[in-house]
Structure formats: structure tokens, C-alpha cells
Image: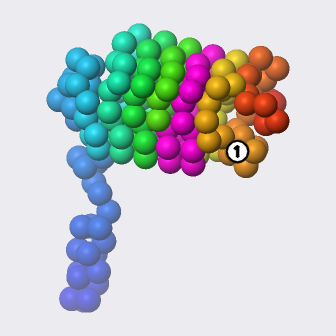
Amino acid sequence: MLKHIAVAAAFALAVPGPALLAQDAGEIAAVQAGESCPGCNLFQADLSYRDLAGIDVSGARLRQANLALATMNGANFARCDLSVANLFGARFTGARFVAADLRQATLVGAYFGGADMTGARLEGANLSGANLAGAKGLTSEQLSKACGDASTRLPDALSMPHCR
């Protein structure tokens, strides 16, 4: 019986509870005001329509965040969790997405001129109408796991499946 209690206690400590995964309103407000916040918990943050050029949110948790129509030129999203995030129509000129998690994200109509996409995870991402023609670090393997449409612009010699 004591063995079962010890195992249950160890499991409870190893698995983060809801409080550890919840968004941090103070950190979100700081980023909304234009402050860099590397490693912050910005879960479901609303950063839409904001001009946050050069902001550093590397390693931050931006899962399910809304960055629609934002301007984040030169921003650092390296190692960010942007899974299931909405990046619709946003501008990311020269931004860093190195090793970022963009799985299941909506990148429809977004602009990535000069953005570094090296090692970014794009499984299930929708890039319809996105402009990645000037993006760096994209590979056929990354793009094969995402989808786009006839208006998606990619670097020369790269292609991707069409969304269904």
C-alpha cells in the first residue's frame, strides 16, 4: 500500500497541474506593451493587430495565441511553442523561427520575408496564401508535412501539398 502511495505522489509531482500550464496575465500584458519576455507563459495570448517589432519571446509558450494581423518584424520566436496559434495575415520580416513549434498553426496570408525557419515544425500547418519566398532554412521535409494553396509563395525549388 505504501508503494502505491509513493508512486501516486511521484506521478503527481512529475505531471504539471493546471496552474502550471495556465497563462500568466502579467507576462501577457508585458508583451502586449512591447516588452520582451523570453521563456514566458503566453498561452492563448491575444497579440493581434499589435506592432511588436524586434520583440524577444524565444522559448515562450504561445500555444493557441492570436497573432492575427500583427507586425512582428525582427522578432525572436526561436524554440517557441506556437502550436495551434493564429498567425493570419501577420508580418514577420526577418523574424527568427529557429526550432519553433508551428504544428497545426494557421499561417494563412502571413509574410515571412527573410525569416529564419530552420528546424521549425510545420506538421499540419496551413500556409495558404502565405509568402515564404524569401524565408531561409525551409526544407522539402518541413513543407511536406504542411499544406498551402496556389497562392502560397515558397523559395525556388520547394513545393508543398495543397490543403484539402
| Residue lying at 28% horizontally and 40% vertically, measured from the top left | 38
Tell me the amino acid under the disc marked 1. Answer: Thr
Badge 1 density bin: few <14, some 14–19, many ≥20, Cα 10 Å: some
Determine the residue positioned at 41% across, 10% down.
Answer: 49
Q: Is residue 58 left or right of residue 155?
A: left
Q: Is residue 145 placed above or below 113 in the rendered structure?
A: below
* Quarter residue 147 falls in: top right
Residue furthest left as drawn:
26
Residue 82 point in image, percent of width and height? 47, 37
- Label 1 element class: loop
Q: How far across and down, in percent of the image, does residue 77 sit?
A: 42, 36
Left or right: 18 as drawn, with respect to 123: left
Q: Which of 43 and 50 is in front in this view?
A: 50
User: Is residue 112 covered in magenta?
Assistant: yes
Nearer to me, 7 or 130: 130
Span colored in magenta: 97-120
Q: Does the magenta stretch include residue 23?
A: no
Q: Residue 116 location, x and y as percent?
A: 54, 36
Residue 83 visible, this angle: no
Q: Is residue 60 visible?
A: yes
Which of the 4 image quarters holds residue 25? top left
Between 6 and 26, the one nearer to me in the picture: 26
Q: Is the magenta region chiefly helix, strand or loop?
A: loop
Q: Picture coordinates of residue 119 (x, y %)? A: 57, 48
Image quadrant occupied by the N terminus: bottom left
Q: Mark 1 sits on what residue?
A: 139
Q: Which residue is drawn at 23% across and 74% down?
A: 9
Q: In the displayed structure, does residue 110 sit left or right of residue 43?
A: right
